[in-house]
């Protein structure tokens, strides 16, 4: 399980109960026998009545006490084998529940596959029926097998757990939209783990630099503190970079001092008057190329002002 998957699962875990006002909560699944047949997670439905006002797919969970969630993020396989394995995990969970609850349990375990898009092979072979934006019933299981195409979902705060599965341009659009709506820690995780374009990642980071708003500056400081505490090697690199820049600045200052001294020496040898104003101008110049140009001009100049043009 990679870090992007962990981030997506954590978003479900942290936001499901808030979005559904306690109607559903996320639960990490127990391991199912058969050499570790384990799904990504469950939605445990506590108050189905509170799901009615929420958009699909949340509202579809009202008919169930538990829903298996399978997350397929950008770069994950969504081919037939991936789907069949997910259905195997659904069947294994159904067997597990039947064993746990006994012969009286006659339920059917639903599964929701959350991915960026509806794959072509599925559209051609399983007759998915679209019943809401980005939401499809997949035959032959129908209401038990939903495919949620995150790229097609609307940008809504109550759909964020599903929207993290977006990809490509749709993911870039989501990242720009969600950035001001979530905490700095969540935003930092999104920038780190989701495969958005480099340009959008930089755009969001640059936004932190273009404001004097004290609240946003405080958020920037929190992000920096999180980075430095979680990645001490970053601090080490910053320290080393500072030392390197210090050494480079020291070398440049040494070359400036040598160039100024050479310029003064040539002016004296050519008996060109060096007034206090000219002396101050030479000392104040910290551009090595300019001083070297003055030095070249001083070799043939007829006056100090001509040399320092």
Image (spheres, grey):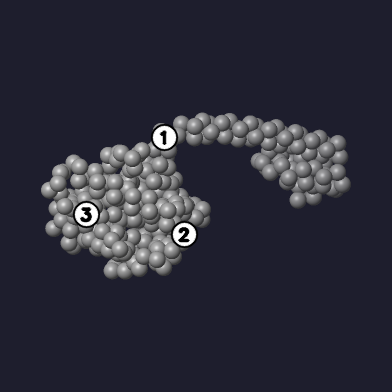
Residue 92, can we see it? Answer: yes
Instruction: Describe residue 295's horizontal placement relative to residue 137 as left or right.
Output: right
Q: Residues within 10 Å of mark 1 (few under 14, many from 20)?
A: few
Q: Which residue is mark 2?
A: 168
Residue beneath the point at 86% across and 43% down: 299
Instruction: Describe residue 105's horizontal placement relative to residue 292 as left or right.
Output: left
Residue 163 coordinates in the image, percent (x, y): 35, 57
Q: Quadrant of residue 288?
A: top right
Residue beneath the point at 45% across and 53% down: 77
Q: Secondary structure at mark 2?
A: helix
Q: CA distance from mark 1 to mark 3?
A: 43 Å
Residue 201 coordinates in the image, percent (x, y): 47, 52
**Residue at the far front in the pictured view:** 103
Image label count: 3
Which mark, by number, is residue 230? 1
Give 26 or 305, whichever is nearer the viewer. 26
Residue beneath the point at 44% across and 57% down: 79
Residue 83 coordinates in the image, percent (x, y): 38, 55
């Amino acid at each position: 399980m990679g870090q992007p998957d962990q981030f997506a699962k954590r978003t479900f875990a942290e936001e499901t109960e808030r979005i559904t006002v306690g109607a559903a909560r996320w639960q990490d699944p127990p391991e199912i026998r058969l050499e570790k047949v384990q799904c990504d997670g469950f939605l445990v439905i506590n108050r189905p009545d509170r799901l009615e006002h929420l958009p699909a797919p949340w509202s579809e969970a009202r008919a169930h006490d538990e829903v298996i969630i399978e997350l397929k993020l950008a770069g994950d396989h969504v081919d037939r084998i991936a789907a069949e394995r997910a259905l195997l995990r659904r069947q294994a969970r159904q067997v597990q529940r039947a064993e746990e609850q006994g012969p009286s349990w006659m339920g059917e375990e639903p599964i929701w596959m959350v991915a960026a898009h509806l794959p072509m092979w599925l559209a051609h072979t399983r007759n998915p029926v679209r019943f809401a934006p980005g939401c499809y019933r997949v035959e032959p299981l129908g209401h038990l097998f939903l495919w949620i195409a995150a790229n097609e979902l609307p940008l809504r705060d109550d759909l964020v757990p599903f929207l993290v599965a977006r990809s490509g341009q749709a993911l870039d659009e989501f990242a720009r939209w969600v950035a001001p709506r979530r905490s700095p820690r969540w935003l930092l995780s999104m920038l780190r783990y989701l495969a958005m374009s480099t340009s959008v990642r930089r755009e969001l980071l640059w936004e932190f630099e273009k404001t004097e708003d004290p609240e946003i500056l405080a958020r920037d400081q929190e992000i920096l503190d999180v980075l430095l505490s979680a990645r001490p090697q970053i601090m080490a690199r910053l320290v080393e970079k500072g030392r390197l820049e210090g050494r480079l600045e020291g070398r440049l200052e040494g070359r400036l001092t040598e160039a100024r001294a050479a310029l003064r020496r040539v002016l004296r040898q050519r008996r060109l008057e060096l007034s206090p104003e000219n002396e101050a101008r030479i000392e104040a110049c910290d551009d090595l190329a300019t001083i070297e140009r003055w030095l070249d001009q001083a070799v043939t100049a007829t006056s100090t002002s001509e040399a320092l043009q």
